[in-house]
Structure formats: structure tokens, C-alpha cells
Image (cartoon, rainbow, N blue to C red):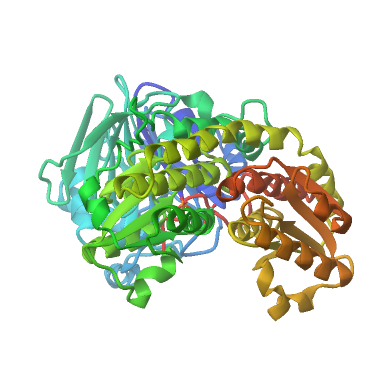
């Protein structure tokens, strides 16, 4: 949520910053802005709407930059997405410019104090208070922007990443963070700052992750990091193992299309290196000792959005393989209901970005209650894994499209691995049993590829439904969360009313919604192993069809029993029941994406959404 970039070095600063913003635009895209020093004078440009509007404004009014610049793409919290509320914000003297990601919770109090001192505000944002406070503190600290920032941060409450430049010290970019992401890119004679490494990966792959409550002072040839009191701070340096091409569209019109196509590779990469020579499962990023895992009496999975759906699927596998009770809860509800947690509870936090504030707060709460926390995350060095006891990284590579696709499938793979690992350390499954399932997982990239090669009829179907007002989704067992994910994708991308129900619940209410021609997507469980479920859902399909529904049935290839009741039959490869979500989700992703494209929507940047939601 909100993308932030800072640069200092010999390259044309404006270009570096705008290019960085383009790579971060998925974080927020309701407005964008930049600030540079041009012949020592602070200049800003900002525009409501997508980055293209800012680019046009910069083209209409070209300016030079002195090798320093900051930029921002916004996802509005305080104040509508207008030119005036866009970042950067400046003080009254136009001496200092600041960009911000997060929410300053005590901004009303701070604004009142500043107004009492005669300060005139130009926007409705919480951020503007920081510009005015920095200006006051610059005077107090003789133009020392680092000292000014530390002093301001000590007064701020809430979550923030702040990046500022000032005319007082034209070679310096200063940034601070609390509960909001910020990474430094270490270049050669140049340095970078950004919300995530995608912004500077074209220039350097050497990164430094900032800790909580730290301030960084960045010059072309130095990086100084302190706490808010000015004491030197501990940081972690790391090398990013993917390059700029991984964050490009690679010939696809949209990132989402590319990311859907990358799913077989992403699954394979997430499985890579998990089995030791002796056949045992090793999860080496797991800093939880087997002894601790043997003590676990309950698992609670917390997550948001698609990650929550991955958690719902994980419950089926973990309870089945490990016989440990497993609850799944949306992170934003979790800590407010006084959940029962103790040192024997393992909390699994699933988050693609590792930055979702709701999930982060749930993690912190769980740790306060002495529970052990394991993160499943796609972004190396992000906050949630850093604050957890262990982490299992999904190796999906960067995901730019706002709607999760390849990261969702890799989260499922990671959940399966956690389930199998727990079964292994707790002695519930023999090595050969675990290896058999690992073998099935290893075949999944091929099966997903097969789905991708046969989805053209799904595209045609989606186009034919572009005018539909509502689509319902039904599933049973693991197919129920898959149905939920299908409905979420459709809401996110096509802005359509879509709802998922457990097929068995249909008769308890939702069946009243069925009317002539209403499209209903049904995810049919595999016939093998769960035949009871299979037969029940076939009856459910008949029930809705009898009431006029247009049935779109996703079933295993060769499942002839559903054909007579399917207006459209989408076949997927036959795979073990618990793994079916890996193949059944893919047509639903394609369906939502294609339907959204048919409606002319931007599938990479759906309205009102942000990929990484760093506010509660
Ligand atoms: C946002 C995104 C969703 C995502 C959710 C959780 O709402 O739009 O696509 O599933 O956040 O994100 P996380 O990074 O925690 O998995």
C-alpha cells in the first residue's frame, strides 16, 4: 500500500524515481508525485490518477534534477485522491518535501498544535503535519534533516514510512520507518530507498532491510542507520536472488496473465530443495526445533484475502495428516476476540507480501501470548517473517498483479509442506508415506500446465458472461475455499457480485437466489477417495439446474456423471483430493481475469485495491 522511492546518485534522479514508481504502482495508484532538487531548489509535481498522469505533467513541464529525488504512488487513507492530497507534501517555505506510507494516528492533535502556531495547511492528509514538523525541526537542528526526522518520529504515533529531502542539505535523503515497509538498495556511488526491492532491482540487488523505529540517512557514498535517538542500529544486509526481468511483463499484456502462466514454475521452485538426500523433508528456514513442534497442541492460521483462502485449504490437509486441531481466521478479527492462545499453540501467518498490517498485528498478538509463530511468505526480509519464530518462503518470484495468483498456489504448496513436516517430526507418517505425497506434489507443475493449455473454453465462457450481474460459486471440502477464491477473484477484477457457498448449505437459504439463467460455478470433488462428497455435489448440481441455473461445472477429466447436468463442463486433471485446489483454482483465475478484460477493466490494478495493505 503506497509505493515509496528515494534516490541519490549520479543518474538522472527524476527518471530513476519515476521508473521506480512504475515498478511499485501496484501498491497504490490513485495518485502519484515526485520531489527533486533542481539547481538547489525544491520542486514537486503530483497528479491524481495513475502514474501516466504524472508522467504527462512532467513531460509538459520538464526540469533538471540534481541527483536526488523522492517519489510516491498513493492508496488514499486520509483525504480523497486529488492532486492536492497526493504526495509529496511540503512545508510553507517549500524547504522540505516528504512522502509517506501508513497512517499517523495522532495527526489531528499534531495538526491542531501546528495550526495554533499559525501553520497553514493545504491538504486533508495526515502526512502534511510531518512536512510542517520537519520544517520546524530543521530550524531547531540547524538544517540537519536526520536529526529533524528523528525528533519528529519520536512524536508520531501509528504506522509510517517517511522519506524526505530538503534544500538545507542537497545531497541527502532521509527516511524513517515504524510498522511499515522500507528497504535500502546499496549501489556503487549511488543509493536507493523503496517500499520494496522491485523499485531498484534494475540498479542493484544488494539490499538492507530496516528494522523497526529506525532512521536512515542516505548519501551517494554513505548509508547511516540509527534508532530514533541517534544510536547506531543493527540491520540485515542481503542479496536479492531474482532480477529485473522477473518483474517485467515478458511479452504479456498484463502482469496477471504472466503470473498465471508462471504457476507451474512457481510451484516447482517452491518445492525445490525440500527433500534431503535421505528422503526426509527439510525446511531449513524453519527456526522452530522439532522438539517444539512435537509440543504443539493446536494450530491457528491467520491471514487475509487470498492468503486466508489458502489457510482454509491448509486446515483440511493439516488436520488430516497431523491430527492437530487447526483453526483458520481472518487476521483482522483474530486478536479482537480474545482468542485462546498458549505456548503450545502454533500460529501460522500466511502473507504474500509479509506486510499486511492485519496479519502483522495478529502475529504480534500471538507472540505476546507466548505462542510460536510460523510465517509463510513470498517476500524475503519483509516484516512478518522477521517478527516470526520461523518462516517458510514461497518461491513464486515477484507478483505484481494485485490479485494473487501464483503466490496463492505456492502458499498452498507451502502449507502442504508444513503439514507433512509436522507429520514427520511428530512421527505420524512414515518417510515413504511422506515421499509419496511429495511425489504427487512434484507432479503438480505438469498438471497445472495441462490446465493452462486447455483453458481456452474458459476464456470464451467468461466473455459470454460479461453482462451477468451475479455469479455464484459452490464447493464442498477443499473445493469450498476454492469456490471462495473464485468468487473473490471475480469481485476484485470484474467488480461483479460473486458469492461462494458450501454446496451443502445451499438448501438452507442460498438456493432461494437461484433464478433462470443465473451462472453457478460448481467445483466438484474428486471421485476417488471422497466419493460420498462427489455424489452429494452431483445432486446439488441437479437441484440448482432444476431451478434454472446455468451450471458451469469444474470436474475431473473423465467424470461422466456430471456431464448431463453441466451447461459448461470444465475438465481438470485427476489429482489426489487434498491437492485438487492446485488445479481447480486455475480455471477460476482465468475466468475472472478474462471476464474483467471483457469489461475493459485493468486486471493488474483493480479499482480501490492495493496489493499490500499496510493499514488496519
Ligand atoms: C490485499 C490484496 C489481496 C491479498 C491480501 C492479503 O487485500 O489485494 O490480493 O490476498 O491483501 O495480502 P498478503 O500480502 O498478506 O497475502
Quadrant showing the C terminus = bottom left
Q: Is residue 288 left or right of residue 420?
A: left
Estimate the x, y position of residue 115 in percent, counting from the top left: 32, 70
Residue 524 to residue 17: above or below: below
Q: Nearer the viewer, residue 129 or 257?
A: 257
- Residue drawn at x 51%, y 59% is 312
Estimate the x, y position of residue 557 in percent, counting from the top left: 76, 42
Q: In this view, does 351 lie to the left or right of 600?
A: left
Q: Which of 502 and 251 is in front in this view?
A: 502
Tell me, yes or no, if residue 156 can be seen here.
Answer: no
Q: Which residue lies furthest to the left in this view?
A: 231
- Residue drawn at x 38%, y 31% is 275
Estimate the x, y position of residue 146 in percent, counting from the top left: 20, 44
Residue 386 to residue 443: above or below: below
Q: Nearer the viewer, residue 282 or 412?
A: 282
- Residue drawn at x 33%, y 73% is 339
Estimate the x, y position of residue 368 in percent, counting from the top left: 22, 64
Quarter location, residue 261: top right
- Residue drawn at x 20%, y 38% is 235
Q: Nearer the viewer, residue 227 or 166?
A: 227
Residue 564 to residue 336: above or below: above
Question: How many labels, in total?
Answer: 0
Quarter location, residue 521: bottom right
Tell me, yes or no, if residue 167 can be seen here.
Answer: yes
Q: In this view, does 557 lie to the left or right of 80?
A: right
Amino acid at each position: 500500500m503506497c509505493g515509496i522511492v528515494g534516490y541519490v546518485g549520479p543518474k538522472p534522479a527524476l527518471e530513476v524515481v519515476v521508473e521506480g514508481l512504475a515498478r511499485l504502482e501496484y501498491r497504490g495508484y490513485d495518485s502519484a508525485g515526485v520531489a527533486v532538487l533542481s539547481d538547489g531548489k525544491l520542486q514537486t509535481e503530483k497528479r491524481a490518477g495513475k502514474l501516466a498522469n504524472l508522467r504527462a505533467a512532467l513531460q509538459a513541464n520538464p526540469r533538471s534534477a540534481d541527483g536526488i529525488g523522492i517519489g510516491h504512488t498513493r492508496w488514499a487513507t486520509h483525504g480523497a485522491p486529488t492532486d492536492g492530497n497526493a504526495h509529496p507534501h511540503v512545508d510553507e517555505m517549500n524547504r522540505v518535501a516528504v512522502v509517506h506510507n501508513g497512517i499517523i494516528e495522532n495527526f489531528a492533535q499534531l495538526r491542531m498544535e501546528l495550526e495554533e502556531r499559525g501553520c497553514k495547511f493545504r491538504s486533508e492528509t495526515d502526512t502534511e503535519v510531518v512536512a510542517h514538523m520537519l520544517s520546524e525541526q530543521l530550524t531547531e537542528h540547524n538544517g540537519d534533516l536526520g536529526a529533524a526526522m528523528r525528533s519528529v518520529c519520536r512524536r508520531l504515533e501509528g504506522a509510517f514510512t517517511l522519506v524526505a529531502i530538503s534544500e538545507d542539505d542537497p545531497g541527502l535523503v532521509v527516511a524513517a520507518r515504524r510498522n511499515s515497509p522500507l528497504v535500502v538498495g546499496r549501489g556503487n556511488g549511488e543509493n536507493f530507498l523503496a517500499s520494496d526491492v522491485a523499485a531498484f532491482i534494475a540498479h542493484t540487488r544488494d539490499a538492507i532491510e530496516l528494522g523497526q523505529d529506525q532512521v536512515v540517512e542516505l548519501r551517494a557514498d554513505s548509508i547511516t542507520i540509527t534508532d530514533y535517538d541517534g544510536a547506531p542500529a543493527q540491520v540485515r544486509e542481503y542479496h536479492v536472488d531474482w532480477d529485473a526481468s522477473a518483474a517485467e511483463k515478458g511479452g504479456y499484456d498484463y502482469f496477471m496473465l504472466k503470473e498465471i502462466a508462471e504457476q507451474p514454475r512457481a510451484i516447482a521452485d517452491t518445492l525445490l530443495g525440500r527433500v534431503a538426500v535421505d528422503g526426509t523433508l527439510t525446511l531449513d528456514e524453519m527456526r522452530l526445533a522439532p522438539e517444539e513442534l512435537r509440543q504443539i497442541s493446536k494450530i491457528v492460521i491467520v491471514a487475509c484475502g487470498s492468503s486466508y483462502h489458502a489457510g482454509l485449504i491448509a486446515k483440511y490437509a493439516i488436520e488430516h495428516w497431523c491430527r492437530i486441531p487447526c483453526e483458520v481466521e481472518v487476521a483482522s478479527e483474530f486478536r479482537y476476540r480474545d482468542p485462546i492462545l498458549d505456548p503450545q499453540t502454533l500460529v501460522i501467518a500466511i502473507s504474500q507480501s509479509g506486510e499486511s498490517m492485519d496479519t502483522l498485528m495478529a502475529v504480534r498478538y500471538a507472540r505476546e501470548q507466548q505462542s510460536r509463530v510460523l510465517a509463510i511468505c513470498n517476500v524475503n526480509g519483509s516484516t512478518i517473517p522477521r517478527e516470526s519464530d520461523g518462516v517458510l518462503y514461497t518461491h513464486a518470484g515477484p507478483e505484481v498483479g494485485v490479485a494473487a495468483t501464483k503466490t496463492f498456489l505456492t502458499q498452498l504448496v507451502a502449507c502442504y509442506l508444513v503439514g507433512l513436516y509436522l507429520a514427520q517430526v511428530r512421527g505420524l507418517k512414515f518417510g515413504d508415506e511422506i515421499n509419496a505425497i511429495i511425489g504427487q506434489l512434484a507432479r503438480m507443475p505438469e498438471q497445472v500446465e495441462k490446465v493452462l493449455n486447455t483453458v481456452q473454453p474458459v476464456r470464451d465462457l467468461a466473455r459470454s458472461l460479461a453482462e451477468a450481474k451475479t455469479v455464484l460459486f459452490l464447493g464442498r471440502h477443499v473445493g469450498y475455499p476454492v469456490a471462495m477464491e473464485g468468487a473473490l477473484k471475480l469481485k476484485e477484477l470484474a467488480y461483479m457480485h460473486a458469492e461462494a457457498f458450501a454446496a451443502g448449505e445451499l438448501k438452507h437459504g442460498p438456493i432461494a437466489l437461484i433464478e433462470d439463467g443465473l451462472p453457478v460455478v460448481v467445483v466438484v470433488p474428486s471421485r476417488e477417495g471422497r466419493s460420498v462428497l462427489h455424489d452429494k455435489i452431483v445432486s446439488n448440481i441437479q437441484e440448482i439446474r432444476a431451478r434454472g441455473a446455468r451450471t458451469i461445472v469444474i470436474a475431473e477429466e473423465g467424470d461422466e456423471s456430471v456431464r448431463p447436468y453441466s451447461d459448461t463442463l470444465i475438465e481438470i486433471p485427476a489429482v489426489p483430493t487434498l491437492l485438487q485446489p492446485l488445479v481447480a483454482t486455475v480455471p477460476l483465475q482465468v475466468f475472472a481475469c478474462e471476464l474483467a478484460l471483457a469489461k475493459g477493466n485493468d486486471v493488474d490494478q483493480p479499482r480501490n485495491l492495493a496489493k499490500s495493505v499496510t493499514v488496519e
